[in-house]
Image (tube, rainbow, N blue to C red):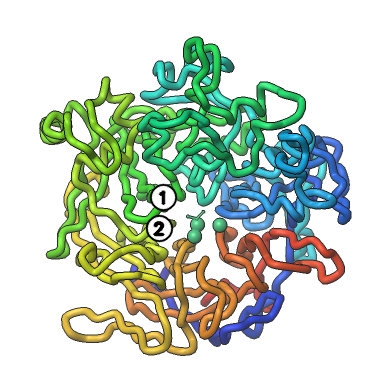
């Protein structure tokens, strides 16, 4: 930023054209290199990646997982107040898996295998999910590599033991055979985006966790499953592992004849949270922070912290017609003592976007008289598909966050994905990726497009620019779409998309340390857009330029940089084929390192 306080947000690079090539495209003067592809050994005995797919489940527990997503670079000296740009901990999510690529000959399905799945395939699939912490360092030639043997190198998987924290810890509806007291669980799943906390830890989001569980009950399932779509089948049939291990059987959440402590009817209630991992304390158990609500968390973004004031963070629920939430801590932030405990007590709000450009944060808290009276009024009615008979307390409200938000009167959005907070203006941006099911009658000012195939980006400013405020003013930053798509403000087109910046389905979103906004896409990779991409934007002028195009079939999701912005890390998820190594028949999710030939600031 300039000495006068005005940010230098210039973008001097030449926009790259759309591309359908099976490679990464960046502007002239920039260099890219694939790094940390799926299967790269990062810990333990560092078992080598086998291109024939024969790595075991145990090997996978020591290697990079699949489907790289949200990622953050923590400078190695962060805890000492430093900001190294040459050494740090790169922490990233592995959202889900490509079973065909994961195993030597694809997955062995239960239907062709006597109704069971080989236990080591299940172990490997669970291990390919979760989070990787990788200690990385740049050598004197500027090449990044893993620090082998570093105590920080770590895998957290779909099986790692973790603690439940916040209001749902010990709640009867989280009691399982594994933890009859409802205080612990195993694993984190479908980790999409993330958020670095102001105290140097990492929050991984649990997004489409519902698909991993099967409830074979005929007829009515509990509302805390129904509202998320848990049904009779699980995505990967892990509960059918042929060794009958408790760690796998738990994905069958059908109630048995005994009590909740005898089976896994409540296992799905231990998923749907933001999960805190302290990368600098490798022996620490991850912590599920339940005060932030239980839903399809895409990620989380923190507002800048101020000494003595509440911590505030925002999280979207990425499903059609779901909501945007804000958490405000009860306890004040002090840099010297800040920690995850700040996320255990506070108020969860949900957003209402009024048609006049104003907005309100609605508390989901039974101690709020307004919310309590809406809950009372809803008893005996049908909310969505659910016959509502009340909440048995605040823990029940949080367990059923979506239902509580329905009752509060939140605005159903066009699939909220990532959020970002402008470091210069304090405005909050969220991608609304698309919503092909919105009808004309369902449109409103914040979601104004029926059959919204291309998505848009919304932003707001909290009242008095105070993130604790319960009112805000919003506008639409940009509508995505083809050439000529306009974003109109007061009768004037403030953006008209052209060849340099057409895009659809904005998803990843990040403000870099200088205040440029990075927009990533997970959309239709067809003409005129071609492969998914990343664009840079100036939040003040709304200038948008395509900076990066990914290989065939991928989504571009997850971006972070070194503090000096001389290195950018961009994740490529589910490439279609032969990438990054044209000689390897298995597509491998990977991180792309972007640098400039002259060592300058990326995007400037
Ligand atoms: Fe995993 Fe909403 O993207
Ligand atoms: Ca996403
Ligand atoms: Ca997406
Ligand atoms: Ca994805």
Examine the rendering and report whether any part of residue 506 can be seen: yes
The answer for how far apart the CA atoms under marks 2 and 1 are is: 6 Å
The vertical placement of 92 against 486, above or below, is above
Mark 2 falls on what kind of element? strand
Would residue 541 appear left or right of 128 to someone viewing this image? left
How many C-alpha atoms fall within 10 Å of the one at disc 2: few (<14), some, or many (≥20)? many
Residue 142 image position (x, y, % from top left): 75, 65
**Residue at x 42% of width, y 57% of height:** 417
Residue receiving disc 1: 301
On the rendered structure, is 364 left or right of 497?
A: left
Q: Which one is in front, 392 or 48?
A: 392
Tell me where residue 530 appears, x and y as whole percent.
57, 80
Direction from residue 41 to residue 261 in the image, left or right = left
* Residue with the mark numbered 2: 420
Residue 3's tag is: none
* Among the 4 quarters of the image, the one containing residue 248: top right
Residue at 24%, 43% in the rendered image: 406
Quadrant showing the N terminus: bottom left
Tell which circle, 2 or 1, labels the residue nearer the N-terminal end.
1
- Of residue 380 and residue 374, the one placed in the foreground of this image is 380
Whether label 2 touches label 1, CB < 8 Å: yes
Ligand 2 neighbours mark 1 (CB distance < 8 Å): no
Give the image location of residue 306, x and y in percent.
Answer: 33, 43
Instruction: Relative to 395, say whether 461 is above or below.
Output: below
Task: Say few, some or many: other residues with alpha carbon within 10 Å of mark 1 (under 14 / 14 to 19 / 20 or more).
Answer: many
Q: Residue at x 72, y 39 (%)?
A: 110
């Amino acid at each position: 930023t300039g000495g006068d306080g005005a940010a230098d947000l210039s973008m001097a690079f030449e926009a790259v054209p759309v591309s359908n090539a099976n490679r990464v495209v960046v502007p002239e003067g920039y260099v890219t290199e694939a790094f940390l592809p799926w299967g790269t050994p990062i810990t333990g005995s560092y078992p080598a990646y086998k291109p024939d797919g024969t790595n075991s489940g145990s090997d996978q527990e020591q290697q990079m997982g699949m489907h790289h997503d949200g990622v953050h670079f923590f400078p190695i000296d962060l805890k000492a107040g430093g900001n190294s740009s040459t050494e740090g901990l790169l922490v990233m999510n592995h959202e889900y898996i490509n079973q065909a690529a994961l195993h030597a000959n694809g997955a062995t399905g239960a239907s062709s295998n006597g109704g069971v799945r080989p236990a080591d395939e299940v172990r490997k699939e669970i291990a390919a999910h979760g989070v990787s912490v990788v200690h990385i360092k740049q050598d004197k030639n500027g090449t990044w590599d893993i620090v082998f043997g570093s105590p920080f190198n770590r895998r957290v998987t779909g099986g790692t033991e973790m603690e439940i924290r916040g209001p749902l810890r010990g709640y009867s509806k989280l009691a399982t055979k594994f933890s009859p007291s409802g205080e612990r669980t195993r694993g984190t799943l479908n980790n999409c985006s993330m958020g670095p906390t102001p105290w140097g830890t990492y929050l991984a989001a649990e997004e489409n966790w519902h698909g991993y569980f099967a409830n074979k009950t005929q007829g009515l399932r509990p509302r805390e499953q129904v509202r998320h779509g848990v049904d009779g089948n699980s995505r990967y049939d892990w509960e059918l592992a042929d060794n009958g291990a408790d760690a796998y059987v738990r994905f069958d959440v059908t109630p048995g004849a005994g009590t909740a402590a005898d089976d896994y009817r409540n296992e799905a209630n231990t998923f749907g949270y933001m999960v805190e991992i302290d990368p600098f304390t490798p022996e620490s158990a991850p912590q599920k922070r339940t005060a932030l609500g239980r839903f399809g968390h895409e990620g989380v973004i923190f507002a800048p912290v101020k000494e003595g004031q509440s911590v505030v963070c925002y999280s979207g629920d990425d499903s059609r017609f779901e909501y945007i939430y804000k958490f405000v801590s009860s306890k004040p932030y002090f840099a010297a003592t800040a920690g995850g405990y700040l996320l255990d007590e506070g108020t969860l709000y949900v957003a209402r976007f009024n048609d006049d450009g104003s907005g309100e944060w609605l508390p989901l808290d039974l101690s709020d008289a307004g919310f309590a009276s809406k809950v009372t009024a809803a008893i005996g009615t049908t909310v969505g598909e659910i016959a509502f008979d009340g909440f048995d307390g605040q823990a029940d409200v949080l367990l059923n966050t979506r239902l509580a938000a329905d009752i509060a009167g939140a605005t159903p959005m066009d699939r909220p994905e990532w959020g970002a907070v402008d470091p210069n203006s304090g405005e909050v941006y969220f991608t609304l990726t698309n919503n092909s099911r919105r009808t004309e009658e369902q449109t409103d000012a914040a979601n104004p497009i029926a059959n919204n195939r291309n998505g848009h980006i919304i932003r707001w400013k909290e009242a008095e620019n105070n993130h604790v405020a319960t009112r805000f003013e919003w506008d639409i930053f940009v509508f995505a779409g083809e050439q000529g798509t306009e974003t109109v403000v007061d009768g004037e087109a403030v953006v008209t998309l052209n060849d340099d910046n057409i895009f659809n389905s904005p998803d990843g979103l990040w403000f870099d340390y200088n205040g440029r906004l990075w927009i990533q896409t997970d959309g239709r990779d067809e003409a005129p857009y071609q492969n998914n991409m990343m664009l840079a934007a100036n939040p003040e002028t709304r200038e948008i330029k395509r900076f990066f195009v990914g290989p065939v079939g991928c989504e571009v999701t997850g971006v972070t940089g070194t503090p000096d912005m001389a290195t950018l890390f961009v994740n490529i998820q589910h490439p279609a084929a032969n990438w990054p190594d044209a000689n390897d028949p298995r597509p491998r999710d990977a991180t792309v390192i972007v640098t400039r030939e002259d060592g300058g600031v990326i995007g400037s």
